[in-house]
Image (cartoon, rainbow, N blue to C red):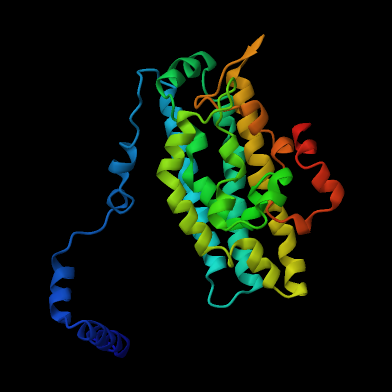
């Protein structure tokens, strides 16, 4: 028996497909013959579980690969949440709260799970398989750099001492001075590593396009357009966002680097040849997305408290 509710839905479906020049009956035939959807097909489980291709037979390399793949998926979710804020039809505190809570949850999961990288692999195994990964490096995570670009005014991603020099430059000029471009230099010569040269070749055009798209609608810009009342509600979540991405997350990488790459009396160079001892500690970089939310004392001691925890 066709109820009134079902009849109404059939009518709406007929109108939907007629607007596309299609016949509803053909689509109903397709439904009759289509197989039922399964969990493993829906999430492409077989593909997912076959995306790990270690370069060595060393078992713990698979841990290293899977964890980085998980990280990139969380970064993709974070970028999606940022877009929901930046391009919301109506900018509101509710939109900020919903999406910032999501991003903070994603990073909380990443930060809390990073023990998998700090203590979850055998040190000797890591030091063996890492040599087969050269010059690849986690430094080359394009999505993390995209998240930075979408979060704040581009000048905030330049080291403080250099900001007066880029104040008059266009976005491309500012990108040429973005802080991480000095984070993959050779320890001895200061020249760009192959890691950095590869990264720039792949992503710099995309970064410039992204910076252009988000120039006036990055998270900081959107926050500053809110009413003072809404800003007061959103600010605590933004401060957590700032700390998660610019202090807690790089600090976990620093702890991992110390765990695996520190060997007295000398440090082992990081996989990409980066000067990680200077680049990773938050107190050295002092990159802050929302400086207007922090006191002068907090900015002066950026990351130092976390480094002592």
Residue 152 appears in the figure: no
Question: How far across and how far down the image is residue 155, in percent?
Answer: 65, 54
| Viewer can see residue 112 | yes
Q: Where's residue 61, x and y in %?
A: 42, 24
From the top left corner, tell me how far across and down residue 4 is, in percent.
30, 90
Residue 123: quadrant of the picture: top right
Position of residue 202 relative to residue 79, above or below, is: above
Q: Is residue 212 above or below residue 255?
A: below
Q: Residue furthest top?
A: 265
Q: Looking at this view, is 237 or 214 the one in front?
A: 214
Residue at 60% x, 45% y: name it.
177
Residue 244, position as x, y percentages in the image: 66, 46
**Residue shown at 53%/54% (left/top)?**
172
Report the side of 47 relative to 84 (left or right): left
- Going 67% across and 40% down the picture, which residue do you hit? 248
User: Where 30 sits versus 254, above or below?
Assistant: below
Residue lying at the far right in this picture: please name it: 297
């Amino acid at each position: 028996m066709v109820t009134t509710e079902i009849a109404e839905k059939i009518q709406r479906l007929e109108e939907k497909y007629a607007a596309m020049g299609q016949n509803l009956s053909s689509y109903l035939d397709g439904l009759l013959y289509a197989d039922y959807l399964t969990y493993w097909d829906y999430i492409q489980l077989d593909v997912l579980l076959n995306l790990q291709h270690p370069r060595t037979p060393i078992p713990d390399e698979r841990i290293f690969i899977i964890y980085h793949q998980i990280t990139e998926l969380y970064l993709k979710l974070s970028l999606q949440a940022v877009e929901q804020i930046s391009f919301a039809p109506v900018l509101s505190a509710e939109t900020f709260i919903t999406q910032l809570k999501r991003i903070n949850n994603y990073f909380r999961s990443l930060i809390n799970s990073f023990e998998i990288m700090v203590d979850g692999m055998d040190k000797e195994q890591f030091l063996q398989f890492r040599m087969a990964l050269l010059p690849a490096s986690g430094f080359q995570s394009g999505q993390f750099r995209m998240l930075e670009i979408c979060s704040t005014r581009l000048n905030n991603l330049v080291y403080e001492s250099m900001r007066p020099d880029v104040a008059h430059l266009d976005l491309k000029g500012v990108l040429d001075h973005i802080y991480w471009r000095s984070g993959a230099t050779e320890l001895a010569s200061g020249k760009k590593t192959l890691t950095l040269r590869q990264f720039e070749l792949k992503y710099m055009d995309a970064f410039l396009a992204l910076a252009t798209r988000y120039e006036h609608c990055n998270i900081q810009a959107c926050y500053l357009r809110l009413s003072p009342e809404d800003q007061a509600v959103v600010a605590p979540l933004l401060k957590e966002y700032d700390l998660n991405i610019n202090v807690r997350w790089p600090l976990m990488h620093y702890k991992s680097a110390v765990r695996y790459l520190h060997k007295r009396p000398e440090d082992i160079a990081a996989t990409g040849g980066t000067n990680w001892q200077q680049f990773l500690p938050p107190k050295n970089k002092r990159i802050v997305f929302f400086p207007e939310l922090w006191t002068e004392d907090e900015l002066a001691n950026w990351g130092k408290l976390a480094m002592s925890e």
